[in-house]
């Protein structure tokens, strides 16, 4: 029952109590002066008890009506926090004849590095070189932390220790422009999956040691631009296809014998999903990887947050943290430079959109994935660069999980290859 007070005076000039309630039409005009109630000999005690009870009831109603409404806690997201532990900028270097740059994806190898202390960790970082400055490739990196003291953990150094060229199934390297590698994820079967955002897009599995293509994941036709269509009415936009890539660590098994889950998403809307005024409707894909028959099992709507005064804004990374939960990285570029935000993402209640050809006029009945801002990186107080890669890393000495980000320097002298280290705390 609504209880909005139209007016409320506890005591007016005549020492009488007046209340007017708008919604439930209570109106108590006068209780009389409480100091002049009748004596007990004339029934006054009973009257005083009734009046006190009535007054208490009215005051309780007033307090209840004025109290702020209770805010329901969103149970879609576990409580989490990201603590910044520092950055490291990789100098401009060449490694085995290739310029180390364009690092757009990163993934962690939990097997570690043999023969070194526990404070050094193995990562693989993917270059987005289209076989222009060298062969399409990924690097083996060693990340060193400064201390095992939970209060003083910092990112000490990042060193390049190896490079692996990506090769087609016939063992030949990719010719210039035929691949635009952006996302990388380590699988449990001694391979990495690579996402290419070019046109046409592809999702391929490559041998971790040789770099040779093992196979491709099936991609629905709605993602593939028609070569003969000059107006391009469907498919990914040029260089805005698949950029994020993640494998659910909860589905890892020795040798990858059991099926595991892989997730990817478009960096920007498909051509048929573009709205005239906003470009926010992205598609998140969920694959089940089985030995010889990988399958797309579902697809969801991911709504990109708009950032004013920007010329570039997109979803650059997804990280699976288990239980239908993700971290997502949205990166922007505008008049104030680069920006980035990390969100918690929950897909449990999202609508399967795999049968929807276009989102135009279709989203009213579609439940998108849920998002919650976890950290705006502009609040770190450091210059930000073109952050594109993100991965879960090793467990830190305090028991929290590490998160590592890397930026793509676009092979430009003025831009930096920036590594950021965070501690992820909460229920994962």
Image (spheres, grey):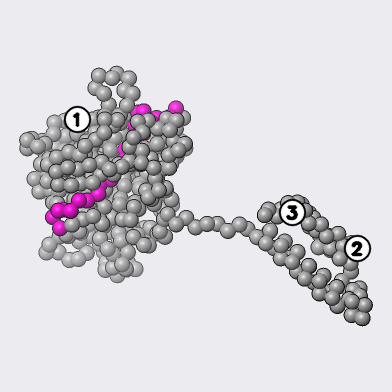
Query: Label 2, on which residue?
Result: 14
Q: Residue at x 89, y 80 (%)?
A: 40
Callout 2 crowding tier (Cα within 10 Å): few <14, some 14–19, many ≥20: few
Q: Is residue 272 magenta?
A: yes
Mark 1 lies on a secondary structure that is: loop
Left or right: where does residue 233 sit relative to residue 13? left
Q: In which quarter of the image is residue 423?
A: bottom left
Which residues are the magenta region?
A: 254-276
- Foreground of the two, 173 or 359: 359
Which of the image's four quarters has the C terminus?
bottom left
Residue 220 appears at what percent x and percent y? Answer: 26, 33
Residue 357 appears at what percent x and percent y? Answer: 35, 31
The alpha-carbon separation of the residues under discs 2 and 3 comes to: 26 Å
Query: Label 1, on which residue?
Result: 177
Task: Indicate which disc residue 24 carries.
Answer: 3
Mark 2 lies on a secondary structure that is: loop
């Amino acid at each position: 029952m609504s209880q909005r007070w139209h007016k409320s005076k506890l005591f007016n000039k005549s020492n009488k109590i007046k209340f007017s309630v708008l919604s439930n039409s209570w109106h108590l005009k006068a209780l009389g002066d409480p100091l002049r109630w009748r004596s007990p000999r004339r029934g006054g005690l009973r009257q005083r008890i009734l009046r006190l009870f009535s007054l208490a009831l009215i005051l309780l109603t007033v307090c209840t009506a004025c109290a702020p409404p209770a805010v329901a806690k969103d149970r879609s997201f576990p409580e989490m926090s990201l603590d910044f532990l520092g950055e490291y900028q990789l100098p401009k270097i060449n490694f085995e004849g290739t310029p180390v740059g364009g690092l757009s994806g990163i993934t962690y190898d939990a097997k570690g590095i043999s023969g070194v202390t526990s404070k050094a960790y193995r990562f693989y970082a993917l270059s987005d070189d289209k076989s222009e400055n060298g062969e399409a490739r990924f690097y083996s990196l060693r990340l060193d932390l400064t201390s095992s003291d939970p209060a003083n953990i910092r990112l000490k150094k990042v060193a390049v220790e190896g490079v692996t060229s990506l090769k087609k199934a016939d063992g030949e390297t990719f010719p210039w422009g035929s691949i635009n590698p952006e996302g990388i994820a380590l699988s449990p079967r001694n391979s990495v999956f690579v996402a290419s955002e070019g046109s046409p897009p592809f999702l391929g599995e490559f041998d971790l040691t040789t770099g040779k293509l093992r196979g491709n994941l099936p991609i629905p036709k709605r993602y593939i631009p028609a070569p003969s269509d000059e107006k391009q009415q469907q498919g990914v936009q040029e260089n805005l296809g698949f950029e994020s890539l993640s494998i659910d660590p909860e589905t890892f098994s020795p040798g990858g014998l059991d099926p595991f889950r892989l997730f990817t998403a478009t960096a920007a809307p498909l051509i048929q999903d573009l709205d005239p005024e906003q470009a926010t409707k992205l598609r998140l894909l969920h694959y089940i990887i089985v030995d010889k028959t990988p399958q797309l099992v579902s697809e969801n709507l991911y709504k990109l947050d708009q950032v004013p005064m920007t010329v570039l804004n997109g979803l650059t990374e997804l990280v699976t943290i288990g239980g239908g939960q993700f971290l997502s990285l949205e990166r922007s570029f505008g008049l104030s430079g680069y920006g980035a935000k990390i969100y918690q993402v929950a897909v449990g209640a999202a609508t399967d959109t795999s049968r929807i050809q276009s989102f135009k006029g279709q989203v009213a009945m579609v439940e998108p994935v849920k998002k919650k801002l976890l950290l705006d990186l502009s609040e770190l107080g450091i210059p930000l660069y073109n952050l594109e890669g993100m991965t879960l890393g090793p467990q830190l000495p305090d028991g929290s999980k590490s998160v590592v980000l890397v930026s793509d320097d676009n092979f430009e002298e003025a831009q930096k290859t920036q590594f950021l280290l965070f501690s992820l705390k909460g229920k994962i």
